[in-house]
Image (spheres, coloured by chain):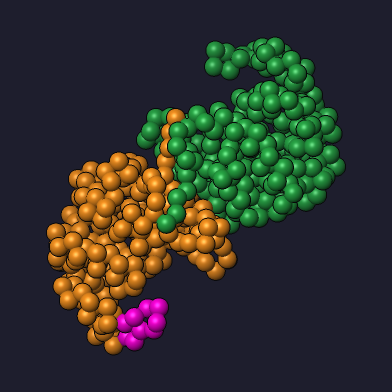
Chain colours: A green, B orange
Amino acid sequence: MKIAVIGTGMVGRTLAGRLDGLGHDVVVGTRDVDETLRRTGDEDHPSFREWQQDHPGVRLVTFPAAGVHGEVVIDAVHGTAVLDALEAVGARNLAGKVVLDLALPLDFSQGMPPTLTVGNTDSLGEQVQRAFPDARVVKALSSVYMAVMVEPSRISGRHDVFVSGDDDAAKATVSGLLRGFGWPAEAILDLGGIRTARSVEMYAPLYFTLVGVLGTYELNIGVSRG
Amino acid sequence: MKIAVIGTGMVGRTLAGRLDGLGHDVVVGTRDVDETLRRTGDEDHPSFREWQQDHPGVRLVTFPAAGVHGEVVIDAVHGTAVLDALEAVGARNLAGKVVLDLALPLDFSQGMPPTLTVGNTDSLGEQVQRAFPDARVVKALSSVYMAVMVEPSRISGRHDVFVSGDDDAAKATVSGLLRGFGWPAEAILDLGGIRTARSVEMYAPLYFTLVGVLGTYELNIGVSRG
């Protein structure tokens, strides 16, 4: 599948690298290709150029070129930058496409747990769908750490991932990608329309509180019933 | 232990009945004892008088009398009524007491999932602690249905309950009550101070979304790690 990952950070790379490894035709979109390639890295965050040497199949392209390429467009920038980045990708390039929104609208300035810049009566997922009404927006994966997104077996025991969106075919496409990452079909819970994205985004403070308690980002919840 | 349950509704009765069955000295507090005893019930919600016939050990008393009685005071009224009810119990009666806050500040007027009347930068748990600074407030059990609160084995598999509060001894008292209900010690997760109540309250929309998807209130989440 032709997939465009929007964002050159660690989340974008994690997804792009894994999707490339699974045989998809992957590009990573950035605002300025030359600037991204000039950027130097550090021990924790190697430069994109360095990363790309290990992933020669992944091409770095501009935001609009990424939009043209992707049948699925994955926004993997910080939550507060998502709408701007997708605007740069271009509404026309997103029309009809599956947009997988996995970002969280987090504000860490008030300490832990983070607060949300949008929530309760709205969500980032809903904002993206409203801003790009011709895109088929699916919220998924925002409840887990990037390494877990693409390799759920890193966590032991039964745990789940949530999918929200108004377009059933788009949700089926995303669920197929999730199964490719290793999520069992029964661990992929379809919550309903994009409005339910607010439920999942509002779980983020509990996730980050649990990160502090358990001392690891690699945790997730599983839903059990009577 | 001397326990006061504030609220004569189904949540209060569930807790009072179970605590009575476990051998605690339980009163239920209400604004007007005569009015509560006069109230008629229906098929889903039997009258309090009817309920009391099955629980002769539980006395119905006024809010202030309940406050005087309880070493532990459990607020089991609707989230929007908690602060008023505890005001009627009396700050002086709550001073030094463990106040177990299990209410959720829910607004169902906008449909499902419910929105929160307070959240993100504050929570009901924090409001209660601020309003009654001499009380030792613990937030717990608000993430599960009343029947599950007092009988966690109704849900199969590993699932957890969260405890938030500034006073460690108060949290230990509440954890003891939870173990009495049947929560295994390893399923009781201490999240930290009362500030973390906001994390748990903000999980409520996901809980109610999952109720809609799974078709039952009797569900809960369990936390797994790598």
Rendered residue at 41%/44% (across/down): B222
- Left or right: where does residue A151 sit relative to residue A216? right
Image location (x, y in percent) of residue B153 = 33, 54
- Left or right: where does residue B45 sit relative to residue A47? left
Rendered residue at 74%/36% (across/down): A73
Rendered residue at 40%/78% (across/down): B44
Reply above or below: B127 against A16: below
Q: Is residue B201 magenta?
A: no
Rendered residue at 72%/19% (across/down): A36
Considering depth in this image, is B1 or A188 the residue closer to the camera? A188
Image location (x, y in percent) of residue A144 = 53, 37
Q: Is residue A186 visible?
A: yes
Considering depth in this image, is A39 or A43 the residue closer to the camera? A43
Quadrant hosting residue B43: bottom left
Quadrant hosting residue A187: top right
Q: Which quadrant: the C terminus of chain A? A: bottom left
Image location (x, y in percent) of residue B195 = 37, 46
Considering depth in this image, is A132 or B26 the residue closer to the camera? B26
| Magenta-drawn segment | B39-47
Image location (x, y in percent) of residue B98 = 22, 55
Q: Is residue B119 visible?
A: no
- Left or right: where does residue B203 sit relative to residue B82? right
Reply above or below: A102 against B175: above
Q: What secondary structure predominates along the stretch shown in magenta?
A: loop
Quadrant hosting residue A55: top right
